[in-house]
Amino acid sequence: MSHRVNYLFFGDLDNISAIQKQHPEAVLSKLNGHVKTYDMQGTPHAYISHYHLDIVPTIYRNGWFSTEAYQYTYNHNTFEVSHMPSLYFNYQIGGLVVEVQP
């Protein structure tokens, strides 16, 4: 069993692209390219992959202009089970807004 997250983002893709150009240090999509593979050799069990994402609304300011986007952090847990393998994404949107200024 394996999975790969090619691209995961929240919000407007144009805003994310603009922020990444203005703020190259910003990491808005931490799971991009994430790969998880489980060795199933010698075990009758399968695995559940569970991701919990905390989404944080963020405003990037550059002079008079501002761009809104969403950052996220995540936690990944794996559980060995005796039924079909599964992949879960749970998320919550934070009640605070982060503002970034140069």
Image (cartoon, grey):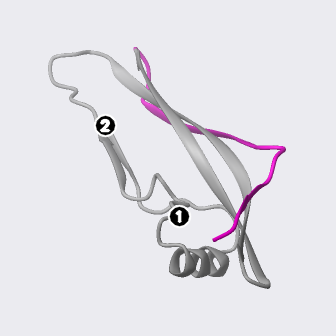
In the image, residue 100 sits, relative to residue 80, either above or below, namely: below
Q: Which residue is mark 2?
A: 1
Q: Which residue is mark 1?
A: 26
**Which amino acid does the dot numbered 1 rest on?**
Ala
Q: Position of residue 61 (x, y in %)?
A: 72, 74
Task: Reply yes or no: does residue 61 show up in magenta.
Answer: no
Image quarter in which the N terminus is found = top left
The picture quadrant where one finds residue 43 is: top left
Q: Position of residue 80 (x, y in %)?
A: 39, 17
Residue extending furthest left? 42
Q: Identify which residue, 73 or 22, lies in the foreground.
A: 22
The picture quadrant where one finds residue 54 is: top right
Over which residues does the magenta segment extend? Answer: 82-102
Among numbered discs 1 and 2, the one appearing first in the sequence? 2
* Crowd tier of the residue under label 1, counting other residues whose Cα lies within 10 Å: few below 14, some 14–19, many 20 or above: some
Image quarter in which the C terminus is found = bottom right
Q: Residue sitting at 73 percent across and 83 percent down? A: 63
Task: Reply yes or no: does residue 88 show up in magenta.
Answer: yes
Residue extending furthest bottom? 64
